[in-house]
Image (spheres, rainbow, N blue to C red):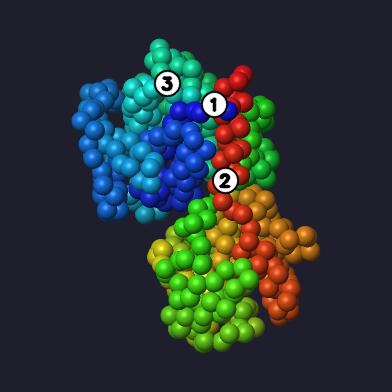
Amino acid sequence: MKKLNIVFMASEAAPLAKTGGLADVAGALPQALQYLKHHVTVMMPYYRKIIDKTGIHIEPTGESIEMWADGTQRYCPLHHAHVDGLTFILIEQDDLYNRDGIYGPSGGAYEDNLLRYVLFNRVALEVAARLPQVDIIHCHDWQTGMIPLLLKTQYQHYKNIAQAKTIFTIHNLAYQGIFPATWISRLGIPTHHFHPESYEFHGQINCMKAGIHAADAITTVSPTYAKEILTPEYGCELEGFLQHHMDKLTGIVNGIDMTQWNPEYDKHLTAAYGAGNIAGKKKCKKALQIACGLDASPNTPLLTLISRLAEQKGIDLLLHNIETWLKRGYQLAILGSGDTHHECELTKLAKQYSKQMYFYCGFNESLARQIYAGGDIFLMPSRFEPCGLGQLMAMRYGNVPVVRATGGLCDTVTPYGKHHATGFHFIDATPQAFDVALEEAITIYQKPRVWSRIRNNGLKRDSSWDASAARYENLYQQLLAQ
């Protein structure tokens, strides 16, 4: 099989800069592809304030790209970093990228985001053209949506990238990168493609549409989500457009780094454990209960949730049920931030029921790992979930998920009643359906032998990137063979 030169272009990538699952994919999938002997380079903006805090060594390359954008001639110095054998190329433009947030202030978006990311798209293509012959350019979400279109138009004369095939991965269709049409002439976007069959959307620019239209292949982060986005319920007004391009649409589930997420070696945990050696998990539960100010009761069901507090995540379904569950004697440990109303409600409930409920507003990686390890039941009532990583991490730590059967949750959590069950499903996005599913889980929790089997199925589940990377490798080879 031919060994490929692959370039990932993304707005964020772990461990340099991260707001969500996109960064995990852009950091982990290239590693898995390199393990398959391909050469992978990751390109992203240099968010100086954010990236420099990681302590990862960033070094100037001594090269820069000159680029006109929005009436200004810009000089964009290039930097690189090397993490676990993977090369990152960072594009500097401090007035655009050296900010407190990646996409905007908390809960918002920067008004010049189109300038920020189209400049990144164009500079990234210029940089790619300086590399040895590129086979694959893999783009992610709306921030890189213009790259396939630019490659097929203004950058076709660059011989080292002209024959490259483009893959556009949709991580979340709800965020499409929609901007006023007045930006077109200011940024060097191909104006003759501003029509409904390309990136025009109700008279505005739609970067997601540009990527869908021009890419050689489209992927989403789970097979079920690939089907869901073809429907009005999940299509975010693009279902008809996606149906027109469905012949190049594939769903491939994300993975996690099984070495980084491993309760047998996780230094953040009170005790180590694994499938067939579960005693340490009981110690982790007790330690979490004590750390959260909860009663240290080994037999009390400890429900957990780690999430953005947003409507997409079904937090309203959770809030509707919390007091009922606490009155039944269950415990809750929650970590997350987002919608201020949800934050206030959870804060109030945690104060009112301090011996049964704990809420940490924000993100804390050490605490998150302790919650995955110490919890009995992990809650993911998402209204939609393209893939989801929380359920994969929860199963890896023997924290049995109760999820709404949507997107990647449907594809990765095998429901109770099926062979090798790893969790519980509910279908309707209602508090009542969520409660019924939780009570089913509680009933099984009270049957230790059955519960142990479900928990061990999750602990042993292969959620690694290996299978996903092999599927991407196959897709790349098919494109190049066409």
Q: Which residue lies at the image location 62% right of the left edge and 26% below the top edge?
A: 478
Q: Which residue lies at the image location 49% right of the left edge and 57% below the top edge?
A: 259
Residue 99 vs 393, above or below: the answer is above
The answer to whether residue 207 shows anywhere in this view is no
Horizontally, residue 55 falls left or right of residue 453, namely left
Q: Toward the viewer: 104 or 273?
A: 273
Q: In the image, which disc is placed on residue 133? A: 3
Q: Toward the viewer: 2 or 47?
A: 2
Q: In the image, which disc is placed on residue 2? A: 1
C-alpha distance separating marks 1 and 2: 18 Å
In what element is the residue under mark 2?
helix
How far across and down, in percent of the image, does residue 46 sit? Answer: 29, 40
Please tell me which of labels 3 and 1 falls first in the chain: 1
Q: Toward the viewer: 74 or 59?
A: 59
> Which residue, as the protein is rendered here, is positioned at the far top?
157
Q: Amino acid at mark 1?
A: Lys
Residue tagged 2: 466
Residue 421 vs 347, above or below: the answer is above
